[in-house]
Amino acid sequence: MPPEPHPDPLTTLAWLVESGADEAVQDTPVNRFVAPSPSRTSSPAPLAGEGNANARPARSHWEGGKSPPSISSPAASGARPVPSAADANPSSDHIGRAMEVAAACTTLPELKATLESFEGSPLKRTATNTVFADGNPDARIMLIGEAPGRDEDRAGLPFVGRAGQLLDLMLASIGLSRTENAYITNVINWRPPGNRDPSPEEAAINLPFLRRHIELFDPGIIILLGAVSARHVLGKTEGIMRMRGKWSEYFVGGRMVPAMPTLHPAYLLRRPIDKKLAWRDLQAIAAKARELKIL
């Protein structure tokens, strides 16, 4: 049978942009409609950082003022560099530094300034802005999302795109507003390229700041938006459909705070039929807030 015609390129491009895939991750484009050509060399030189699962892509090999390798360098000659002890876990020092500087913060503005000056996350190198939080810092209800998207990265605020507009409507349905009695942040403060999920290493660098963020805000209720948020805050590995609508507890400030995972607004935009599940979660959250006299 003859091959099916390729879709209209403009339609495909519009779909990719709508999905958040709005940037290239390689120096040159790749035509996925043709088979890759065989290698012309029998022993290609290894990529920068080969042998290190946490290494950044080769296109950023010369960031930070490093010079490109000369012809006589190991990378240019095809020889494999001998890994050092520091290469075994390059993010370990950044995690330790994040724990140190986050613990030293005593106020939310101080934590925000510390995050903006922190250079230990590879995500910050590709992000436009540090996305800290939005809402009323004196509120008692804290919402934690996953990571900034394209609109949030540009604005420097969480949940300002289509998902954020839906979130505002969801909050309003139970008497909440980010300007009055709700506070919103994310697990990750910098947009991952292409809106992908953060890697475990990237999340580990951010977690000390998130934990200190929760401690300084001192919430009465925590709402976890999506599986990534529930996984990193509660340490659970179940799918969001199994976790949503069930109360858990998070220890902060010497007490246990009720925390509920629910469906992320971006997911609800893709599957509007599941809004009924989110509505049940919102009703349970409103009831708990009234019980605790914080709504």
Image: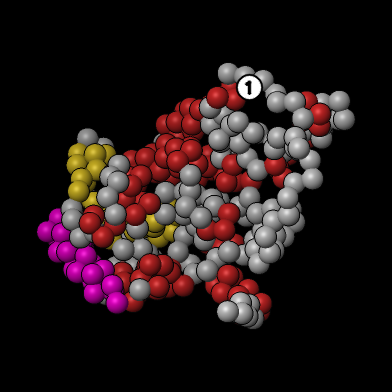
Label tally: 1
Q: Which residue sits at x=33%, y=76%?
A: 272
Residue bearing mark 1: 83
Q: Is residue 76 above or below residue 244?
A: above
Q: Is residue 23 magenta?
A: no
Which is more toward the observer, 26 or 79? Answer: 79
Evaluate whether residue 39 shows in this view. Answer: yes
The quadrant in which the N terminus is found is: bottom right
Q: Which residue sits at x=40%, y=73%?
A: 270
Please provide the residue range marked out in magenta: 273-295
Q: Residue 124's x, y, as percent?
A: 59, 46
Amino acid found under the numbered disc labelled 1: Pro
Q: Residue 121's x, y, as percent?
A: 56, 40
**Most common SS among magenta residues:** helix
Answer left or right for 94 relative to 42. Answer: left
Which is more toward the observer, 86 or 112? Answer: 86
The quadrant in which the C terminus is found is: bottom left
Q: Which residue sits at x=65%, y=33%?
A: 49
Q: Is residue 109 above or below residue 287?
A: above
Answer left or right for 89 relative to 210. Answer: right
Q: Residue 245's x, y, as percent?
A: 20, 60
